Image (cartoon, rainbow, N blue to C red):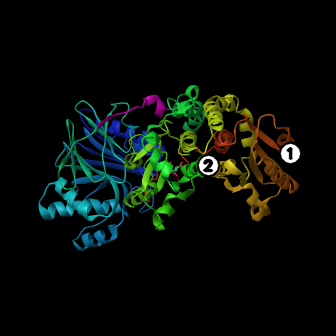
Amino acid sequence: MCGIVGYIGHRNAYPVVIKGLKRLEYRGYDSAGVALLNGGLKVHKKKGKVADLEEATLGKNLDGNVGIGHTRWATHGEPSDRNSHPHVSNNGELAMIHNGIIENYASIKQELINNGYQFHSDTDTEVLLNFIEDIKINNQCTLEEALRIALRRIVGAYCILLIDQNDPETIIAARKGSPLVIGIGKGEHFLASDASPIIEYTKEVVYVNDYEIAIVKADELILKNLGNEKQTPFITKLDMELAHIEKGGYDHFMLKEIFEQPQTIYDCLRGRLLPEHDEIVMRGIDNHIDSFLKASRIVMVGCGTSWHAALIAEYIFEELCRIPVEVEYASEFRYRNPVINEGDVIIAISQSGETADTLVALESAKEKGAFIFGVVNAVGSSIARLSHAGAYTHAGPEIGVASTKAFTGQLAALTMMALKIGYKKGTLNQERYTQLVRELYAVPEKVKEILTDTSHIKKIAEKYASASDFLFLGRGYNFPVALEGALKLKEISYIHAEGYPAAEMKHGPIALVEETLPVVFVATHDSYYEKIVSNVQEIKARKGKVIAVATEGDQQISHMADDVMFVPACDEIIAPLLSVIPLQLLSYYAGVAKELDVDKPRNLAKSVTVE
Ligand code: G6P
């Protein structure tokens, strides 16, 4: 979703801003633009990629030590040059970029039109910008004051950067509900939607909070709240290297991230899962163990792939902790006025920690007295900060739009949590606990084994890449894995795919089965095995093509299926961590076979920061 970059300091701003925008490309966007202060305001913007913008600015004067840049993911108005950011105010003095949505923009726009304002785009951003200009002129106040007044009037979410050609020494920024990070350099500041554009210049950053305004100069950073009171900037040290956000020899970020999983799962377990002592150390759980032990129910909320991690965790928590679990799409949970009782535990699952639906769902649950536990990948993100406690997944920056290593990180963290709580609660006996701790500890090596040779998965993907539809089926712990497999294939290869519990197949999807339909069975050795074998037979009897994810050495499935992708044997509770890997690769290779942009699939955004 929209990416924001700003620079003020001794360097030429343009290359810093352009490079930063490229680092944010992974978020998904459809146009890009920059504004520079260079003896006046210079704005360049273009529908398409950042490279198109660069081409459009060739030969132009791009000097200036102050710049703001934006990649836009269209919400109000189609992707076009005119709707791209930065927008310029009617008097030509102010330029602004914005990530978020101004919900009451229509009434403000009408007010401004009545005052003689003209609009050159269909965006809510241009409305907010002119609103600020109008307040500044009418009240004869500073830009900062005008912004404060405007922000008190608007409803919605925003991260904005604002520059004024009359004040070439300042960038003003503000946030509510959309992330903003400020990097602190020597005599320079970097502003961005996340840390990836900043990391190569400085590791010292300030995460701006909701309802804060930042007045940023080359050598000064002032934070204020909307009541004009100064706030102390809290400087955090980034625990991230430049190499983490570069491709490191892989063709795509998605492939790199799939191959990183032995390490990222290990990083998630490291220092927490201690098999030699039969112990799990998770401070977020240890400090709040009573909330979990007393919980009459747990509600897990998330979106997309994170929602699938929640579905698997539901099975694991109910089995090991005997606590009823409900899994909710964050967007539905938020808007259907759910019953939340004091003492309910809400587990929020999010890679980015910025997904607007999840964030808003949590805010309202928190207001109603629920205890919020975040399972988040992005350190310092909004969800991490809003939660009462949490566990980071430690998967490192995930750049590919389709989530892979973040998903297995979520599963590893959630499985550890369930083991710990179940053991403390006494619903998980010592013997099973010890066995599962060891099984979990062995996962990184087993993932490595799956990744040793992926050429057969590539061949299977190429064989079926021209299919128009796929069905993914699984049972028990592997049912949500089937959903995730279908989602991944849709996202990356644009092949229509549906995931179902294998038994549900007979209640509808079986009508689709014919020779041309590939059906992927996630059929590892578990307590549902015999049942799923019957389902495979039902598909074969109707001439469907069966691709199976099976446990190494499984002769029965091998004989029945057209193609098999093996994973090492493991306990059924751990199985999703392994069975999802071949499905990630299947989608990746199918997308590559179709020559698609697997890292940035059309219309998708990495971090969905609008509701
Ligand atoms: C977007 C991404 C998905 C992700 C979902 C939830 O749709 O493309 O990969 O699963 O958002 O994101 P979160 O950051 O909250 O896990």
Q: Position of residue 380 (x, y in %)?
A: 38, 41
Q: Residue at x 54, y 58 (%)?
A: 328
* First reached walking from the N terminus: tag 2 or tag 1: 2
Q: Position of residue 322 (x, y in %)?
A: 60, 51
Q: Which residue is mark 1?
A: 560
Residue type at tag 1 = Met
Q: Nearer the viewer, residue 576 or 255?
A: 576
Q: Mark 2 and mark 1: span between their CA atoms? A: 27 Å
Residue 101, by quadrant, is bottom left
Furthest residue toward left: 140
Residue 133, by quadrant, is bottom left
Q: Quadrant of the C terminus?
A: bottom left
Q: Residue at x 42, y 49 (%)?
A: 354
Is 232 situated above or below 158? above
Query: Is residue 240 found inside the magenta-colored segment of the image?
Result: yes
For residue 383, side relative to residue 314 (left or right)? left
Q: How many marks?
A: 2
Residue 582, by quadrant, is top right
Q: Residue at x 54, y 32 (%)?
A: 279
Q: Which residue is mark 2?
A: 312
Q: Secondary structure at mark 2?
A: helix
Disc 2: CA contacts within 10 A as few (<14), some (14-19) or many (>=20): many
Q: Please report contact status of discs 2 and 1: CB closer than 8 Å, yes or no.
A: no
Q: Position of residue 545 (x, y in %)?
A: 81, 50
Residue type at tag 2 = Ile
Q: Position of residue 319 (x, y in %)?
A: 63, 48
Q: Nearer the viewer, residue 348 or 459?
A: 348
**Residue 469: which disc?**
none
For residue 573, side relative to residue 177 (left or right)? right
Q: Which residues are magenta?
A: 235-246
Q: Secondary structure at mark 1?
A: helix
